[in-house]
Image (cartoon, coloured by chain):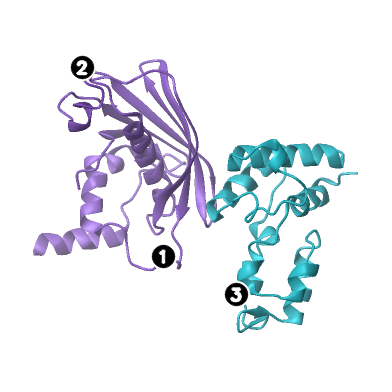
Amino acid sequence: MRWMWIDRFVEFVSGERAVAIKNVSIAEEPLDGYAPGIAVMPNSLIVEGLAQTGGLLVGEAKRFEERVVLAKLGKAVFHQPAVAGDTLTYTAIVEDIQDDGAIVRAESRIGDQPQADVELFFAHLDERFPGKELFNPEDFLMMLRVFSLYEVGRKPDGSPLDIPERYLEAERLAGQR
Amino acid sequence: MPTKDEVFEKVQSALVDALGVDDDEVTPEATMVGDLGAESIDFLDIVFRLEKAFDIEIPRAELFPEDILTNSQYVQEGKVSPEGIEELKKRMPFADLSKFEQNPNVQDFGNLLTVSDLCRYVESKVGAE
């Protein structure tokens, strides 16, 4: 799983808000050739990073029982380009979660400067899209661990987030293989 | 208490923002799905904007009576029974079901809701005059 457009979470309050950081590096392939001579990060990948921040926030709110996909971008405003060497701070805030999906407001900042503001709509896939999970459970848990989700994650009452038992079980089984 | 015109203006503005359509496309007769191109995820957006604009709660089942439309008591062979139509009328007094009644295919239900239905629904919630 290489399609990771955040580096790690620095704050995560279940069902409410998440803050992730993304260090922009010239070693990343998409920066090479997108705008020749300028190591600028494509805005589409900033949206992807914001969507990963918000999507994991929405998924975790229901303990990853729902299959969450980005369905719609309400608005996307970019205030300045992000270039190699910048650290982007992505903040996602849940506006509303319903049975069929969720609305998230997200922003990207470079230091104290706004870089992007987006409004994201996530859908919970329903029976019209049959199939099992979107991700292999042990790989998904590994990704969440890499993102430090369970290191920084808290419930709204401040207690630590617990990992869904089915993921731990998948991890145990994978370890035995 | 807002007037009916004020309700329409706010509904119009919510639809313009949510669907990326022009003001003049949002006429009272326009259907949400057929004319304005709303897809299922857009309703999440529209409902949320209306809740904020009018400071109301919109229970999803009031606008989208999925439970009736998926109930075999009310739907047979893809058509809503007269009993089912009665249930829909009770649930959605703001919607004009007269056309749907003539040929009540469940799959056509999604394209029933018009802008004025939505306005009437909001009016009933805010007690507009």
* Chain label for disc 1: A
Judged by depth in the image, the label closer to the viewer, 2 or 1, is 2
Q: Colour of chain B?
A: cyan
User: In the rendered structure, which amino acid carries the disc numbered 1?
Assistant: Phe
Give the image quarter of residue A29.
top left
Q: Residue furthest right?
A: B129
Residue drawn at the location 11% of the way across and 59% of the way down: A175
The x and y percentages for residue B5 are 84, 39
B103 or A62, nearer to the observer: B103
What residue is pinned by disc 1? A129
Q: Is residue B117 left or right of residue A130?
A: right
Answer whether labels 2 and 1 touch (C-beta < 8 Å).
no
**Res. B54 visible in picture:** no
Q: Earlier in the sequence, mark 2 or mark 1?
A: 2
Establish if A100 lies above or below B47.
below
Answer whether labels 1 and 3 touch (C-beta < 8 Å).
no
| Label placed on residue A37 | 2
Establish if A40 lies above or below A60.
above
- Would you call the spot at circle 1 few (<14 residues within 10 Å), some (14-19), or many (20 or more)? few
What residue is pinned by disc 3? B70
User: In the rendered structure, which amino acid carries the disc numbered 2?
Assistant: Gly
- Compute the Cα span from label 2 to label 1: 43 Å
